[in-house]
Image (cartoon, coloured by chain):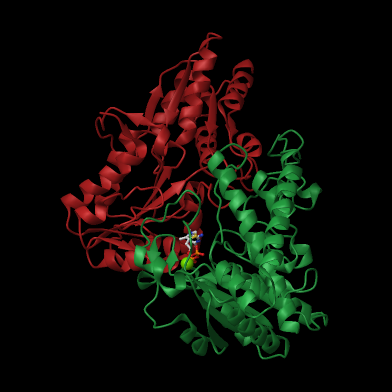
Chain colours: A red, B green
Amino acid sequence: MSITYLEAIREAQFEALRENPNVFLYGQDISTFGGAFKATKNLSREFPGRVFDAPISEDAMIGMAVGAAIEGARPIVEMQFADFSSVGFNQIVNQAATLFWRTNTACPITIRLPSGGTPGSGPFHSQSMESIYAHYPGLVILAPATVEDAYWMLLESVKLDDPVIFCEHKFLYYHLKADGFGEAMPIGKARIARPGRDATIVTYSAMLHESLRAAEELRIDGYEVEVVDLRSVKPMDTDTILASVARTGRLLAVGESFPWGGVTAEVIARVSSEAFHLLDAPPMRLNSKDTPIPYHPNLWKSHRPTTANISAALRQLLRY
Amino acid sequence: MELRDDYLRALRCMILSRTLEEKLGSLYRAGGRIVGGVYLGRGQEAFSAAAGVNLRWGKDVYGPLIRDQAGRIAYGEPILDTMRTYLGAVTGPMRGRDGNIHRGQPQKGYMAMISHLGSLLSVVAGALFARRLQGRLGDCVGATSIGDGGTSTGAFHEGLNMAAVEKLPLVVSVANNQFAYSTPTSRQYACENLVDRAVGYGVKGFGVDGTDLLACMQVFRTAFDNARAGQGPQMVVGRLLRLGGHGEHDDASYVPEVKKNEHEGRDCLFVAQQQALDLGWATADEIEGWHKEARREVDKAQAQASKEPTPDPYRENWHALSTPELVEGMNE
Ligand SMILES: Cc1ncc(C[n+]2csc(CCOP(=O)(O)OP(=O)(O)O)c2C)c(N)n1
Ligand SMILES: [Mg+2]
């Protein structure tokens, strides 16, 4: 049985709806249509009265989910594209994220963000928002890179009593396949996706796969590069990162979001301040470029990190 | 007399728009040059063109949306710019940085939509506001569009309210094509008719049969006259049906067959051509000639844009600021 990353997301929502009658789904075109990417295909038929088409009102969609969560529901909200969550930004960072801290009331909502670039999608259907949301206290930010994680982490998100920003990568939707869902790993734990001894790449989401290919390229030159998949951007598993850097002495952090600040900067900051003595070379980071995300594939391919420039960065890191 | 001239101009824009969009659709289906989505205005040409013919290129402010190819032509955008943008040619106004419907030339008052629905209304309002502030508003108007779905955004509400407060010369076209992607209007709003909202905003509202070019021309003319005469924003709601998918990737199987047979499901282009014949404003030969000319123009634009270069990442400056000295060296 071969399952795609996208099917895993559908299956997780199926299971969440089946397990708990308080779960409901809210999003644009997600009911009979099954969503812009078909992540909720057939769910409205399988769970009548629990999958709702929302108006194009992201602010109100999130606000409504927060209100419902206060009353004991566990909504999963689909943003049609991660980029449109900016319209619900206020409700996410000010309403949902502060609720528990201010009022001791849990806010168990899951916001699914179809994230990241695909060719020809342009500046408004390609964004990666994890760094933005991670900046705010009170949110859990997940970015699964595998079919297994897409399934288990989404299911876990719904059970969590805190607001979860679930960053699922559109580039992986159809490309990535697995034979099953494997076993669940806890949220908040990073995973050694490939063991090595010469350098560590810390990455997540679609960049995991580019990084793994780069690590494979360097094997030909005799280097063993360790690749850490963060899985959970916030909380970030600093221990696993530090343990890896202790083994390799060299660090490259790779992310698809914009270069100013963000997840990769956080990784570098933590390692530099907590484990400076472990480093044999200045830590490096690689992100997309500091411009909006281009439409044309020629530009898009150069805008985001790729196997080629991750390999180049690794070589520079290893030469130091 | 004058209405006749405008009408025929609108009709020719509709024909050119339909011809161009059919080409874009077939290029998309053929695969290859067009990467990303193709979003067409089939069935909405009359409503869009009737607004567009009231606008002057380089003078009035226009913020068209997803299904306004006909209005864009009527406003004065060369179809070569459409082709260049879809094909990602660097010679186009978007230089391959943005694509398809996300195009414009803001320096000329031709706003380039972002995807986030509703957000353009306040931008068009802002342009008018500044012109008035600078004493150069004159007889300029602004126009922008939205769909039934887009009216559910906070941005649309805030923008229209603000424009009304400022009494700006703005015409807002609401193309109620009964669907927002797959979502029917019953899941979008609970009011009887979107035009009823005009009262709440304190703007003048009009409802019109969006499949009837003549009716659209008359209503938009009044709306633009009112706006130019200082009566504040005008909201025109057109009833029609999206005659196709949301984009070319979508077969729109969720649109019930009966809808297509309703009045709103009429093809506005056929209706307009018949109307022109009935009114004695054009002959069948003339109309056929306009189609031929449109095909020639579209082929020419395609041939031209196809041989133009696509962007080269090594020649891109990768700057997002207009002040080069302030660009951080993050892209090396
Ligand atoms: C704020 C926002 N949310 C979601 C979307 C995704 N989206 C693009 S077009 C569309 C449907 C638009 O429907 P409508 O406004 O009726 O215009 P139509 O496509 O029918 O012309 C949606 C949901 C978007 N562009 N902007
Ligand atoms: Mg619509």
Question: Where does the image place residue A28, in percent across and percent down from the top left?
Answer: 39, 60
Q: Is residue B167 visible?
A: no
In the image, is residue B261 above or below residue B135?
A: above
Observer-nearest residue: B87 or B210? B210
Observer-nearest residue: B15 or B208? B15
Q: Residue at x 69, y 45 (%)?
A: B96
Name the side, left or right, on which B10 lies relative to A203: right
Name the side, left or right, on which B160 lies relative to B256: right
Question: Where does the image place residue B47, in percent across and percent down from the top left?
Answer: 59, 73
Q: Residue at x 26, y 44 (%)?
A: A12
| On-image quarter of the C terminus of chain B | top right
Q: Quadrant of residue A150?
A: top left
In the image, is residue A314 above or below residue A154?
A: above
Name the side, left or right, on which A14 lies relative to A197: left
Observer-nearest residue: B292 or B177? B292
In the image, is residue B237 above or below residue B66?
A: below
In the image, is residue A246 above or below residue B14?
A: above
